[in-house]
Amino acid sequence: MFYLNKKTIFFLLSILLFVSDIFSQKQLRVGYINMDYILTNLDDYNIANKEYDIKLDLWRKEIESRKLSIKVANEELEIKKPLIPDEIYQNLKDEIDFDEKELNQYIQKRFGPEGDWLTQEKILIQPIQDEVLAIVQKIAEKNKFDFIFDKSSAIIMLYSEKKYDISELVLKSILRQEKIENLQITFEDDRKKALEEKIQSKRDSISKLKELRKIKRDSLLRIKRNNLKSK
């Protein structure tokens, strides 16, 4: 069974009261999207997400490898401890401790609260999310929506009718925009290719004309030499 805590109930009641107050003043237009559904149907997002996962996986593997090296070094040092002077043991122990400290700093750098994992997410994934939000805003303005919620976010939607779901509309708008952009790129490439072919054709024509002129000139020179010889 699904239970709601007091804070959640209070939050939902607050929203209902707020909406009811506005609803009493005018007819509301409310819609919702499923951001997860939209993103997973975008090739750019799937490619970016895959690249993001690969980077994180590489960092994790590097961390695990360094952890294992430190663990092995510690175990080997403890085996050697009875056989080496205390001073040498302490120096080696300090080196291992230093490596462990460096590793902890590296972990923070990669996966800390402000680590590289956030930076990579902003670089690879956030631009695609921003594109989706921009399309949502355009649709909201065009269709005069008062509210659009994200079903996949932390907001609890206890019930929602399918007719208010504009996820497909947002997805189709993005895919249509991508298709237009791809057509523009293809058109530009075709136009560039046609221009290059035209320039090359002109160069070939000039080259052939030069060759014909040379043949004609050589022919005239041979005729002239033959005439001189006959005299």
Image: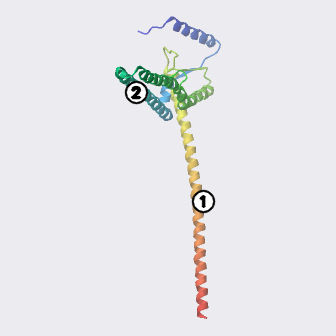
Quadrant of the rendering where the C terminus is positioned: bottom right
Answer few, some or many: residues within 10 Å of disc 2's Cα (few below 14, many 20 plus, some between 14 and 19): some
Quadrant in which residue 205 is drawn: bottom right
The percent coordinates of residue 113 (x first, y second) are 53, 20
Q: Is residue 186 above or below residue 123?
A: below
Q: Secondary structure at mark 2?
A: helix
Q: Please report the residue visible at 53 percent of the width from the left and 7 percent of the height from the top.
A: 7
The residue tagged 1 is 199
SS for tag 1?
A: helix
Q: Nearer the viewer, residue 137 or 40?
A: 40
Residue 174 figure quarter: top right
Mark on residue 93? none
Please identify the residue farthest to the right as the structure is shown. 25
Binning the other alpha carbons within 10 Å of mark 1 as few (below 14), some (14 to 19) or many (20 upward) gives few
In this view, the residue farthest toward the top is 6
Q: Residue at x 52, y 31 (%)?
A: 171
Disc ID at residue 69:
2
Point out the frontmost of discs 1 and 2: 2
In the rendered image, the quadrant that contains the N terminus is: top left
**Residue 208 visible in the snapshot:** yes
Q: Is residue 169 visible?
A: no
Q: Nearer the viewer, residue 75 or 35?
A: 75
Place of residue 101 in the rendered image (x, y in percent of width and height, measured from the top left): 48, 22
Where in the figure is residue 102, as x and y percent of width and height?
49, 25
Q: Amino acid at mark 1?
A: Ile
- Mark closest to the chain's N terminus, 1 or 2: 2
Q: Which is nearer the eye, 136 or 165?
A: 136
For the residues marked 1 and 2, what is the alpha-carbon distance in whole angstroms? 62 Å
Image spot of residue 228 (x, y percent): 61, 90
Q: Residue at x 61, y 75 (%)?
A: 213
Q: Name the amino acid, label 2.
A: Ser
